[in-house]
Amino acid sequence: MLLKNLVTKESIEAVIELMTDRDFEAIQNEQDRFDKFDWSLHTGEEVYKLRPKNDDKILGLMRLTDHTDPTINAIEIALLEVSCENIGSSKTFENIAGCLIGFACRESFKRGHDGFVFLLPKTELIHHYHDRYGFTHLPIKTVDRPEGLMILNAISRKLVAKYLE
Amino acid sequence: MKTYKEIAKKHTPAEIAGSLVFPSAMSAKERESALAEFSQFRKQAADKLTQKEKTISLLLQLKFLIEDYVASDSFDGSRHFGHFLKEYISRLDKKNKEFAAEINVDPTELSQVINQHRKPTDKLIYRLDIHSNKNFPAILWFRILEKERVYELTHNPEIIDKEKKHVKMKLKFSLQR
């Protein structure tokens, strides 16, 4: 998969791998770069890192939950964070989150979940996840909690092709 | 750690959606309710899948399993060329004889390759590439064979040693010293 450096205009190859204990320690020491969520709570869980192929510097993190219950049969993106320097108008690399979401879609196919991926969104972000990635909003049938779920299925294949190939 | 409100002071919702997925703030009961809704949706979506979509899903799974296997350092004797070829044919819901006819290969040859009694020919691999409409390119199939070959040579050096008698002259130095 390729990341575009918006400063140099070069594309670099990136890889997505499972986090190791050492990686979790490294992230703890880089809380200025990953300052939104406490990733130390998820040591030993299924957490992936995205890094440049020729560099150990972690650019993005994603925690997945594999729902193997046949009635769910999907991958949940439980947590995702792009490093601070890659968020907003002055970011260095583009598509880090897209690559991670594409990877989640790929894992969904690989594990026999037919590309079904979901996440539980903040209300404020519902239509942004739809606009940016094509998530479908499935509201829960209560008026009080409109967040519901954001689901990828038909579009999963396209996201894999767009971000990973 | 930061709340959405704190983050939203610095970034727009679009920027946040493009870089973060927050942990769910739902209670256990709300989450259970959400998963129940998803479960219904999932069932309805699965019931609507066409045969073509089911086949695509099965083939994508196979392709990703092959890609990750050839990229890994580990070797698994059960995941050989013949195994993956058999999976390809099976996921297309075809019988060996029917598939052999589609790529104009003798069914006996196909069976022997699947059961590891003979190696696949280059011709067979090129036809798999074409049959799969390049979804399973020849390079991918060759990478499976290469992995098997590397394992074989690493663990059976006598394969090379038995050719000693045919080599009349060899270099007298080693590049490693």
Image (cartoon, rainbow, N blue to C red):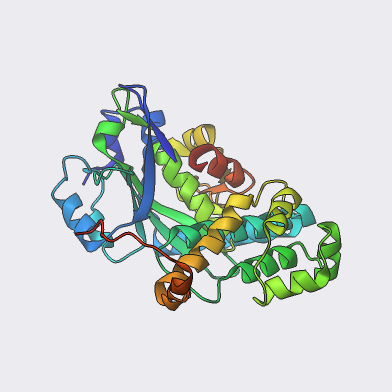
Q: What residue is rendered at 32% in x and 27% in y?
A: A88
Closer to us: A87 or B153: B153
Q: In this view, does B156 lie above or below B54?
A: below
**Quarter location, residue A22:** bottom left
Is A50 displayed left or right of B88 in the figure? left
Residue most extreme to the front: B168
In which quadrant of the rendered image does the N terminus of chain A lie? top left
Closer to us: A153 or B129: B129
Q: In this view, does B99 lie above or below A3?
A: below
Is B137 displayed left or right of B110 in the figure? left
Where does the image place residue B43, in percent across and percent down from the top left?
Answer: 67, 61
Where does the image place residue A73, in percent across and percent down from the top left?
Answer: 57, 64
Could you tell me how many numbered marks the image carries?
A: 0
Where does the image place residue B115, in percent across and percent down from the top left?
Answer: 68, 77
Where does the image place residue B53, in percent across and percent down from the top left?
Answer: 73, 53
Q: What residue is rendered at 60% in x and 59% in y?
A: B61
Is A74 displayed left or right of A97 in the figure? right
Residue most extreme to the left: A29
Q: What residue is rendered at 28% in x and 61% in y?
A: B172
Is A31 displayed left or right of A161 in the figure? left
Closer to us: B43 or B31: B43
Closer to us: B27 or B165: B165
Residue B95 visible, this angle: no
**Quarter location, residue A155:** top right
Residue A14 visible, this angle: yes
